[in-house]
Image: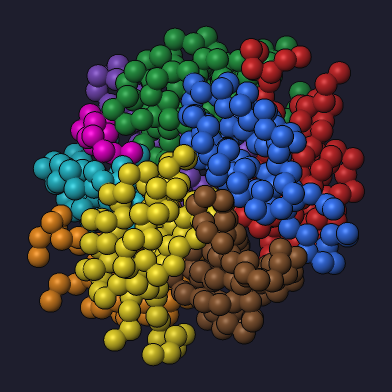
Chain colours: A orange, B yellow, C brown, D blue, E red, F cyan, G green, H purple
């Protein structure tokens, strides 16, 4: 079955960038992570088995990390006629 | 089975408020709609059978309405330990 | 008489999602609440008897909850010719 | 009876600043207007007899002016214990 | 001589609305203030003798108030051909 | 040599989602693309040989596609002590 | 006498980047200009003799260029005790 | 060799404006700095030898200053055909 893909754009409290970056990498759901210096500080790609798993990842793992100031999660949409499969 | 609930915050091109408001109400997926004058112009509550249905609603119905300037869809999360059922 | 409807989009300090979610549900003015993971963390639908009641709800109840980082309240507009009744 | 006060922050399509500025001043509801060059282009102070009048002003007058790109209306709140009268 | 007019849009830390509202009213530069519940919490109208006075007001008075989370100051522009006098 | 990675968050004019999505996939620089329905409409991952290549991709390819309303490009940072290699 | 310095952050309609970039450089008030790919497309540094000159530059020159989608002008503040001279 | 130019838009915790402003000026990478009162509080122009130097400046110097609430760094792009040299 196809995984549910989403990206979370994260604002980190300045000076805690390193801890957040390292903690985020320890989660199995995190498939990719980059540090960036635009209007967000970290971008992570998340793969989940189901919506329920994504919910638990965001609220019970990601948002409990000290140093995370705010998160915006963008879920992949797969509208018929645009995306195959 | 529980419906998938989401809210879409809509920015409308000024002067086309009425058409968009009326078109939006004709869709079965739209459970509630209010006009508002804060940073968005319309708020709609959407009920979908599945993620696929939501994708089709947003991209093949909502975003094809003339007068819609931008849409932001916020999906309901149901993290374990926070939400029952 | 028709109730005054508004939606409040809430940003919560990460890690305090659960307390805010539970407190918000104890208020009689709150008709609906969803957790979400887009650019806001909670969306609540508020029903008030009057503008004065809404003001008191927002400033004396909602914004005094520990963990609420910011609130944006969007009031329902009912322009003549667009909305009946 | 006290008037309902609100401020509308307006984004104008560049190059149409002048027409919008002049049209806005012809409305009786507009008590004050400044041009500005921060994240908004015009700020107007609106006085309305009732919420219904404000709704009609925003949707049937203000948002029908050619050149208005977006509007954000912020209504005055008067929470008990904070504001007298 | 004409005063320099500006509006400052203020985000207040929730639960400190009242102190900030009351402190702001004690400043002579503040000509008007409303509480609001859109994307900002307070809107103040500021009258200054000069740009230097405005600078001092914003940085040495307004932004030193406990409870102020962020400020955006929008200065009145008076482009020739648009504004008389 | 390591590629320069960046993500571009794209706002698309509603109703042109499909053309933009399909055009974007034809570019060799685009390593991944998802459609999404939060505050952006498409997220693309871009791999470039150099900053100059990224500049040309963004300005001479991506931003010339009809239907692209705005782009925000976030470049990967690799601060010493945080990222190895 | 010291010049009044400000920065204008400009959003350009995609595909018109080049014309706007070239036109902006022809103005004597523009002291520096960079193209960028974050949440704005051009950043210009503006030097003006007075507030009135800045107003005229922004409204009668800059915002009349075809392709400019929006402008945000940030004026230099020089609060006493922070900035000398 | 040409320096890599970028601008960082900084939000400062109110009441710490002065310390941040003074600290920022001690860095060799900072070529220019203004205080401002729009949606950002400080704008700095940064000159770096390489992307790696910029990364280290932003994450190991700038974002470790007490009082910095958030930073958005906008890198200069030099697309062929638009910018010479």
Q: Residue at x 22, y 35 (%)?
A: F65
> Where residue C38 sits: x, y (%)?
42, 63
Q: Identify whether G56 is placed above or below F13.
A: above
Q: Residue at x 80, y 55 (%)?
A: E21
Residue F18: tell me if it is visible: yes
Region in magenta: F59-69
Q: A71 left or right of F16?
A: right
Which of the 4 quarters of the picture holds residue H52? Answer: top left
Answer whether residue D44 is magenta in the image. Answer: no
Q: Nearer the viewer, residue A30 or D61?
A: D61
Which of the 4 quarters of the picture holds residue D31? Answer: top right
Quarter holding the N terminus of chain E? top right
Q: Residue at x 20, y 62 (%)?
A: A78
Answer whether residue F60 is magenta in the image. Answer: yes
> Where residue G85 sits: x, y (%)?
76, 23
Q: Identify whether F36 is placed above or below D36.
A: below
> Where residue F64 sits: x, y (%)?
24, 31
Q: A40 left or right of F10?
A: right
Q: F78 left or right of G74?
A: left
Q: Nearer the viewer, residue E58 or A68?
A: E58
């Amino acid at each position: 079955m196809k995984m549910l893909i989403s990206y979370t754009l994260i604002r980190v409290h300045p000076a805690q960038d390193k801890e957040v970056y390292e903690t985020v990498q320890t989660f199995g759901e995190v498939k990719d992570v980059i540090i960036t210096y635009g209007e967000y500080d970290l971008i992570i790609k998340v793969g989940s088995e189901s919506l329920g798993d994504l919910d638990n990842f965001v609220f019970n793992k990601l948002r409990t990390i000290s140093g995370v100031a705010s998160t915006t999660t963008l879920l992949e949409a797969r509208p018929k006629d645009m995306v195959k499969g």
